[in-house]
Image (tube, helix red, strand yellow):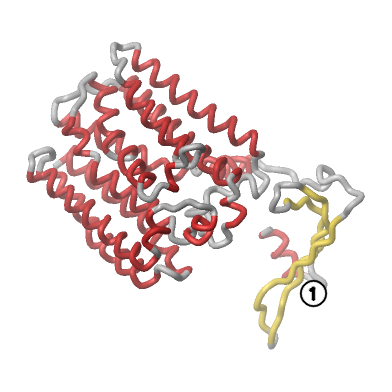
Amino acid sequence: IAKWLKEARKNREGYSTKTTFIRKDGTKFAAEFTCTVTMKDGKHIGYCGRTEELKDVSPMDTMPKTSLLTRFISIVAITRLPFLSATWIPIIASVVWGIQKELIVMDWVTFGLVFMGGSFLHLAANTYNDYFDWTSGTDQINNDYFLQLSGGSRAIELGLITEKQLFRLATSFLALAGLSGIVIMLDNKVELLYYGLAGAFSGYFYTGYPLRLVARKGIGELLIGLNYGPLMTMGAIYAMSGTHSWDAFLFGIPLGILTTAILWINQFPDSKADEIAGKHHLVVVLGLEKSSWGYLFLMLAAFSSIYALFEYKIVEEGALLSLLGLPVALYYSYWVINNYNTRELAGANWGTIGIHAITGLLLIIGIGYI
């Protein structure tokens, strides 16, 4: 598209090309596309595009060639790979914490299996979520999403993958997560199965029928907080040590709340479509204005819980370094409260991801080096 726009700027008559487009229902069609520059008072103010369907031409004949870079970007889009930080940070933080507490001795092979297993489980959840949001009709209703942030990957709608392929991909990720877990369990850690089943259950039924937990007025948010926080950290410690640690469970609470905040803010632009589709999560139930204050509550709860962990001697003083993220959290809370019903909210969506990452990294540094 960038090339088309560039060529259109060079030629007064615009730029024409034959290509393949994808309808919202996923079907492809060949078309001739013409792009011209829109001018006003001698200034370039935009573009105008015109599409004419080529009914006698196969869409495969006009399909553009796909570069390796484009394929990589497609994979990132389909899997929503950047969101894996919500898994990676709790796993790394819990292992660093476990070493400090002398609960575990570092075993890089086991750590690698934990890291891969958690990542595959997260990817399975992402792709199952997209599959069920599409098959339930939620994505087709939603036109207010923030691309890359909310509304899922839109991979099926964009023609990057078919329904069946997406379901098979999600199931493959789940199988790979299970395989990683089985290898760990062979080291006399059979009870890791409980953590894996909890993650698999939540990942599938978060949007999957018949339970569709995301629609059950808070259960979805609770599961996200547990799975990407306490259960992740407790499970990682068990996988590394063979010991169930409730301190590890408590250690994961701040990161779980911050991950819930990411979900929470990403539900704002989707709320109208979600309500129509019957996804009655808490943002739909409370409404956007009250939910904006709920965002502030989540931020205060996350950072308060970090201090509580210190007070109860679950973490050492170095962990308080992560409280440096609090001013940023308060800034974006103010942003959300004042922009909850505008497109300006997107800045806070990105900011919330940053808060999770910065706070998590500071927590790791504080525990490991201070």
Give the farthest residue toward the bottom: 41
**Pointer 1 local density, CA inside 10 Å: few below 14, some 14–19, many at least 20:** few
- The vertical placement of 76 against 184, above or below, is below
Q: Residue at x 49, y 54 (%)?
A: 150
Where is residue 313? Give x, y as percent. Answer: 8, 39
Q: How many labels does the image show?
A: 1
Asked whether the viewer can see residue 273, the reply is: yes
Where is residue 13? Give x, y as percent. Answer: 82, 72
> Judging from the image, what secondary structure is the residue with disc 1 in?
loop
Left or right relative to 38: residue 146: left
Q: In which quarter of the image is the N terminus?
A: bottom right
Give the farthest residue toward the right: 56
- Which of the 4 quarters of the picture holds residue 37? bottom right
Where is residue 303? Give x, y as percent. Answer: 20, 53
Where is residue 108? Give x, y as percent. Answer: 31, 22
The residue to which callout 1 is attached is: 12
Left or right relative to 32: residue 66: left
Q: Which residue is drawn at 13% across and 40% down?
A: 315
Q: Which residue is drawn at 38% across and 23% down?
A: 113
* In-front residue for pair 105/273: 273
Left or right relative to 22: residue 141: left
- Which of the 4 quarters of the picture holds residue 312? top left
- The vertical placement of 144 against 217, above or below, is below
